[in-house]
Amino acid sequence: MTQFAYTDKALELQKRFDTTALAAAELQVIVHDALSPGDRAFVGQAEMFWLASVDNKGSPTVSFKGGAKGFVHMPDDKTMLFPCFDGNGMFFSMGNIATTSHIGMLFMDFVTPSRLRVQGDAQLTDDPAIVGLWPGAQFAVKVAITALITNCPRYIPRMQRLEGSRYVPDVKTGAQPIPGWKRIDAIQAVLPQRDQNKADTAGGLISMDEWGDMVVKGNPLA
């Protein structure tokens, strides 16, 4: 039986908008605590999801996580695993996970369209057997699923997929090109040692304004 439950304020809103009976029925129909075959197929094709987390004061953040198709692993029907690849070095979401563990995950397919919400308790892991599933990963996250919610596709814009990100680590070697922002001249002195002097082999240094212009124009090298 899922641990999912409505808060008192949610119940008040359900009463206000005459959805109490509907919301109660949905607990039986769309809320579940284990991955269904359909969930597995959907997540198994995903190249991205959005990760919500909270710090010890309850302040939330949401971040985008991407990878090769099927990068989220599901070793059993109540567990998900995903990698932490090289990012901006803030470890904002990962720090929240290490602090409070409570997360939400939103999987979205804009082509179909369809979506799946996942709630769970997460922990960071350096287990080589897990981290090794993704060459290039710094560490990984193990999620104990507490609830899954299958949502209807209403309001999801229908979009066409063009291509995957060039920055996703190679699934065999973990190799990935240097991102454009690591070429910005103003941050060279504070880059991790492993990234020092890489800009020279990726087209040279650029200014913050030049990088911003690349982002606005959709330059894939940004």
Image (cartoon, rainbow, N blue to C red):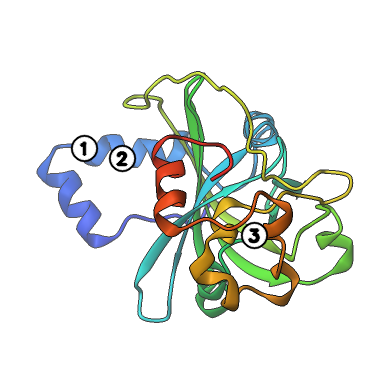
The reply to whether discs 2 and 1 touch (Cβ–Cβ < 8 Å) is yes
Is tag 2's residue or tag 3's residue first in the polypeptide sequence?
2
Q: Secondary structure at mark 3?
A: strand
Q: Residues within 10 Å of mark 3 (few under 14, many from 20)?
A: many
| Label 1 Cα crowd, 10 Å radius (few <14 / some 14-19 / many 20+) | some
Which residue is the site of mark 2? 23
Query: In the image shown, does 76 or 15 lie closer to the viewer?
Result: 76
Residue 57: image quadrant is bottom left
Identify whether 35 is placed above or below 193. above
x and y, in percent, of residue 128 in the image: 88, 67
Where does residue 172 sit, x and y in percent of width and height? Answer: 89, 44
Comparing 74 with 55, the one in front is 55
Residue for point 83% across, 54% down: 135
Mark 2: few, some, or many residues within 10 Å (few <14, many ≥20)?
Answer: some
Q: CA distance from mark 2 to mark 1?
A: 6 Å
Residue 65: percent from the left, percent from the top?
57, 50
Lateral position of residue 208 relative to residue 133, left or right: left
Question: Relative to 13, is 99 above or below?
Answer: below
68 left or right, relative to 204 = right
Nearer to us in this view, 77 or 93: 93
Residue on which the image places disc 3? 143
How far, Cα to Cα, is label 3 from label 1?
31 Å
- Residue indicated by mark 1: 19
x, y percent for residue 222: 53, 45
